[in-house]
Image: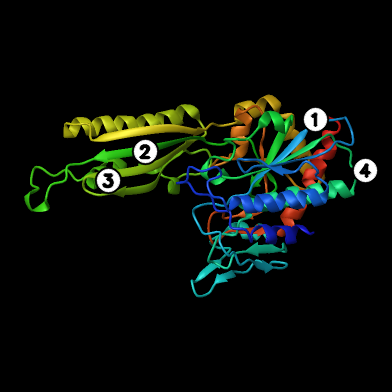
Amino acid sequence: MSIEERFLKYISFDTQSDPQSSTIPSSMKQLELGKYLVEEMKKIGIEDAHLDQSGIVYGTIPANSDHGKVIGFVAHMDTSPDASGQNVKPQIIRDYQGTTITLNQEKELYLDPHEFPELLNVIHHDLITTDGTTLLGADDKAGVAIIMSMAEHLYHHPEIKHNDIKIAFTPDEEVGRGTENFDVEAFHADYAYTIDGGNIAEIEYENFNAFSAVVEITGKSIHPGSAKNAMINSIRIAQEFDAMLPVHARPEYTEGYEGFNHLENIQGKCEKTVMEYIIRNHDLTLAKKQCQDFENIAAFLNQKYGYPMVKVTIEQSYLNMREHIEQHMYIVENAMAAMKECGIEPYAVPIRGGTDGANLTYMGLPCPNLGTGGYNFHGPFEYVSLTMMKKQVEVLLKIIERNEVI
């Protein structure tokens, strides 16, 4: 099966995860892709392929050499809750010429190089886009397809010597729960790579420190006809709270290493309003200061209005993996050398987000992130370079070959 056929098959499964669910995995439909992948892995020759009770797919390509370390490759099966992943209708553009791509004329949705300048980097590539009604699912089914194509190639080419190769496909990465039940000890890899990024020239080994904040505001609901000097509208207080956070630290004004506070959801009435934020920064000290800002604003408003109207609950989501990866830089250096051997000039970029690899790193499995060739994740403008996907298979194979001498 070609990598194109694989990818198109995988995106036909609706695997959207659900942030409101407490089940494991968060949506049972993710298991359907998991079951399919197990069957495909066994057909390839991965005899121990299995789907565990938490929805994670595991498998091993047995060693044909005792040299080198045991490498793992990880991707996630779920798609983002931000946009529908049901009934995806992909469009294939052969030998892209750098012009505007019509996604959906009725909705007036277009991929215009003026708006999406990274399109200029994929001229003459074969691209797969959406039809403008759903996301595509390149995040991260492109990663799944790349790993599966690599695995199939290894079985057809036993002359490529390697130690055990470990494979895992996780659910619920998009809702921050992809590694909650990951069995690092049983996975038994010395190090791993997630295949969950964008441009395949990029390697990512530092990510945000991530926290979530829930702000609960309790107002005083009085009939509006007799509300003077008595009503306290919690929605107005919510506006006041948000306005006291620095405007320049909103995601739409940040890039690179700049952190942000993002108001993701707000629901309320006069009596009670709840706001949900995510807090991000590559620098842990600055991230903690942002968290303290939330506490300070709550204390100020509670003092101003004379009662404990604002409650802030902050939880840690994940931490920056950089300091741990830097203790094992050969993992990054080997990948970058492999890219160069495949004709790619690599560069490291900070992840403005998180991956399963960040949590796996803190669980004892160093795990930087490599690209898929996908862009504009989580919405109808998502697309993937099939040309890059094919090249990334070559890179993974070269990483494995080079690992023989580590």
Residue 261 lies in quadrant = top left
Secondary structure found at label 3: helix
Secondary structure found at label 2: strand
Q: N-terminal of the two: label 2 or label 3? A: 2
Which residue bears the numbered disc 2? 214
Secondary structure found at label 4: loop
Which residue bears the numbered disc 1? 69
| Amino acid type of the residue that numbered disc 2 sits on in the rendered structure | Val
For the residues labelled 1 and 2, the Cα–Cα distance comes to 43 Å
Which residue bears the numbered disc 4? 159
Which residue bears the numbered disc 3? 239
Local crowd size for mark 3, using a 10 Å CA cut-off: few (<14), some (14–19), many (≥20): few
Q: N-terminal of the two: label 2 or label 4? A: 4
The location of residue 145, given as percent across then percent down, is: 72, 52
Residue 199 makes an appearance in the image: no
Q: Residue at x 28, y 45 (%)?
A: 273
For the residues labelled 1 and 4, the Cα–Cα distance comes to 18 Å
> Along the line of sight, which residue is nearer the eye, 120 or 195?
195
Q: Are marks 1 and 2 in contact (CB under 8 Å)?
A: no
| Amino acid type of the residue that numbered disc 4 sits on in the rendered structure | Glu
Q: N-terminal of the two: label 1 or label 2? A: 1
Which image quarter holds the N terminus?
Answer: bottom right
Q: N-terminal of the two: label 3 or label 4? A: 4
In this view, 111 is above or below 403? below
Looking at the rendered image, the disc whose residue lies closer to the viewer, 2 or 3, is 2
23 on left or right of 299: right
Furthest toward the right, the residue is 159
